[in-house]
Image (cartoon, rainbow, N blue to C red):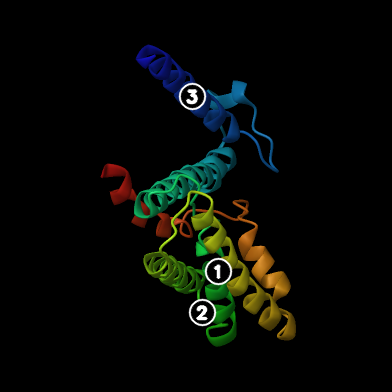
Amino acid sequence: MFFKHILSLKVLIALLLFFGMISLFIGVISINVKDILNLNSTQLEIITLTRIPRLIAILLTGMSLSICGLIMQQLTQNKFVSPTTAGTMDCAKFGILISLIFFAGASFFTQAIIASIFALLGSFIFIQILRKIKLKDVIFVPLIGLMFGGIISAITTFFAYALNYIQNIQGWLQGSMANVMQGNYELLYISLPLFIL
């Protein structure tokens, strides 16, 4: 059984490396894999300034989300709890709305920090709600999180619709990595200490 896990882990790492390398050559400007040793300055700049940062951002984001899920499961001792079923994502959405209303001219970095703070506050509130209830059934805990998230999401959607921010918030929540370039993904480095732990 242990060797099966090691083998599947090796296969998954090999697939990650393979698809990661392929992604460096996929984009609006086509770069042929055969030309890797004969790249001109424009192609080299595209790979180093946009595609490698995009790949790093995707990997860091994926690892961060999995660690967040693991932390939420450990805090609640429930395997069905994740940032999406605990209201964390909905609180981040509310934080985006707050940043758009009160800090409209703020940088991407500032707005991301505000959304992160609201996500942390939402997780804290969810944990406090769980401490108050006596019944902590495996299914009941995520249902509480979904209800909590639904309330926050409804409030956010109401004000976003009233203030015409629905499209802006949806743009934030899509998670597109198309605009990731060197200089605007470094906020993800905050999650690196979690990988070491």
Name the spot of residue 42 as percent of width and height, x first: 58, 42
Depth check, mark 3 against mark 2: the one in front is 3
Three-letter code for the amino acid on which mark 2 is drawn = Ala
Q: Residue sitting at 53 percent across and 32 percent down?
A: 20
Q: Residue furthest left?
A: 197
**In the picture, which quadrant includes the N terminus?**
top left
**Near-viewer residue (126 or 118):** 126
Name the spot of residue 168 as percent of width and height, x first: 67, 71
Depth check, mark 3 against mark 1: the one in front is 1
Q: Residue sitting at 41 percent across and 19 percent down?
A: 5
**In the picture, which quadrant includes the C terminus?**
top left
Seen in the picture, residue 90 relative to 78 is either above or below; the reply is below
Which residue is tagged 3?
A: 12
The answer to which quarter of the image holds residue 169 is bottom right
What is the CA distance from the residue labelled 3 to the residue labelled 2? Answer: 40 Å
Which residue is tagged 1?
A: 148
Label number found at residue 127: none
Q: Are marks 1 and 2 in contact (CB under 8 Å)?
A: no
User: Is 84 situated left or right of 160 in this image?
Assistant: left
Earlier sequence position, callout 3 versus callout 1: 3
Q: Residue sitting at 65 percent across and 27 percent down?
A: 32
Label number found at residue 106: 2
Earlier sequence position, callout 3 versus callout 2: 3
Judged from the image, the secondary structure of the residue bearing numbered disc 1 is helix
The 10 Å Cα crowd at callout 3, few under 14, some 14 to 19, many 20 or more, is few
**Near-viewer residue (131 or 37):** 131
Name the spot of residue 156 as percent of width and height, x first: 63, 76
The answer to which quarter of the image holds residue 2 is top left
Earlier sequence position, callout 1 versus callout 2: 2
Judged from the image, the secondary structure of the residue bearing numbered disc 3 is helix
